[in-house]
Image (cartoon, rainbow, N blue to C red):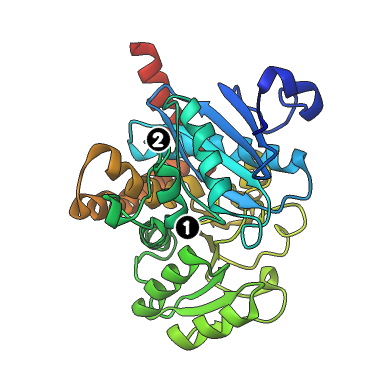
Amino acid sequence: MSTNLMDLNTQSSAFNVFSNRAFDNHEQVVFCQDKDTGLKAIIGVHNTVLGPALGGTRMWSYRSESEALTDVLRLSRGMTFKAAVTGLNLGGGKAVIIGNSKIEKTPELMLKFGDFVHRLGGSYITAEDVGMETSDMDLVRSVTPYVTGISEEMGGAGNPSPITAYGVFMGMKAAAKHTFGTSSLEERTVMVQGIGHVGESLVEHLSNEGAKVLISDINEERLKSISQKYNAKIFEGDLYKATIDIYAPCALGATINDQTIGQLNAKIIAGAANNQLADEQRHGQLLKERGILYAPDFVINAGGIINVYAELEHYGRADIMRKTENIFDTTLNILQMSDREDITPHQAAFNVAQQRIDARKGGQ
C-alpha cells in the first residue's frame, strides 16, 4: 500500500502556505494522500492554547488544491474563535477531503483518513461537516478515538446539525431583539439559503415560530420537499436583491462579498455558514455603514461544537441545550459591545475570543 504524509514545510512553496492570505500563524498544516483509496486531504490545526483542535471534516469538489487549502485555513481559524467565544476548552482545527462525497467517498477512504487523524496523536479531533454523515464518523472511530459526533448507538451525541440550527435560531432571535426590540420572529421574512441538514432544521424552527420563510437551494427536488413539509416558499430570482428582514446563509461561505454586498436588502444577516464575510474587516465595516446587522457566524453557529464537545466532557442532553440556548445571551452581549465601542460585530466577537486565548496563554 502506498501512503504519503507531507507536512507544511515540504509543501509551502507549491501551495504558498505562509503567504496565503488565510494563513494566520497556524500551528500545523498536514497534507494527506493515499494512492490506493484515492484520499487527498488537508488537516489544518490553527491553535491549541485552550485545548486540542476540534473541527469537522468537509468533503467537497474543490476547483483546485489551492482553493481547498484556503478553505481549510479559514475554517480552522474560525473554529479557534468559535470555541473561545463559546467558553469551551478547545482549540481550532478543520479538515477537508478533496472529492465528490456522493460518488468518491468509500469506507476505505474514510478509514484511511481516520488513520491520518490518529497519527496526530490527539492534537486534532475530527467531526462531521459538509459531505459527511454520522456513519462516516463511526467508521473513523473504529481506527482512532480522536473523533466526535459519532452515533448515539456508539455512545456519541449523534448528528450535530439540529443543535447547530438551534444555536443559529437563538442567535437570530438575539439579533432581532437588538434590531427590532423583540426576539419574536413571527411575521418576519427570513431567507434561508441552503437547506441541507442544518438549513432544514432552521426552517423548521422558523416555521414553528410563525416566520415567513423563503428558501433557496441548487437542489430543486429538495426545495419542493422542504417547501411542502414546512410550508416555506421557494424563492425564485436574485436572493441578494430580495426585500427581507433576515438573510440566513446556510450553505458555503463568502456569500457576503464585493459582488453581493451592495445588493443586499436585508436588515439582519444571521446564518449557519462558516466564513460568511469574504473579507472580515472590509465587508464587516461595509455592512455596518449600510446599517445591516451581522450576527457573527462563529458565535451563532457554535451549537454543533457544543454538541460534539459533550462527548469529550461527558455531559448530557440537558446541558447541551442549556449551553446552546446561551448563544442568545452571548450574541446579544457582543452586539451591545459592538455599539458601545463603535466596532463591527465581527470585531467585537473576535476581541472576546482573543482575550480568552491571550489570558490562557499568559497563564501558561
Q: Which residue is label 2 attached to?
A: 146
Query: Under tag 2, what secondary structure?
Result: loop
Number of marks in the rendered image: 2
Three-letter amino acid code at the position of disc 1:
Glu
Q: Give coordinates of residue 49: x percent, y percent.
A: 42, 21
Q: Give coordinates of residue 228: x percent, y percent.
A: 49, 88
Q: Which residue is label 1 attached to?
A: 133
Q: Quadrant of the N terminus?
A: top right
| Residue 133 appears in the figure | yes
Q: Give coordinates of residue 342: x percent, y percent.
A: 51, 40
Q: Residue visible at 40% across and 75% down?
A: 204
Q: Are marks 1 and 2 in contact (CB under 8 Å)?
A: no
Q: Quadrant of the C terminus?
A: top left
Three-letter amino acid code at the position of disc 2:
Tyr
As rendered, which of 356 and 154 lies closer to the eye?
154
Could you classify mark 2 by the number of other residues whose Cα lies within 10 Å: few (under 14), some (14-19), or many (20 or more)?
many
In primary-sequence order, the first of circles 1 and 2 is: 1
Could you classify mark 1 by the number of other residues whose Cα lies within 10 Å: few (under 14), some (14-19), or many (20 or more)?
some
Q: Give coordinates of residue 343: x percent, y percent.
A: 53, 39
| Residue 342 appears in the figure | no
Q: Residue visible at 67% across and 35% down?
A: 33
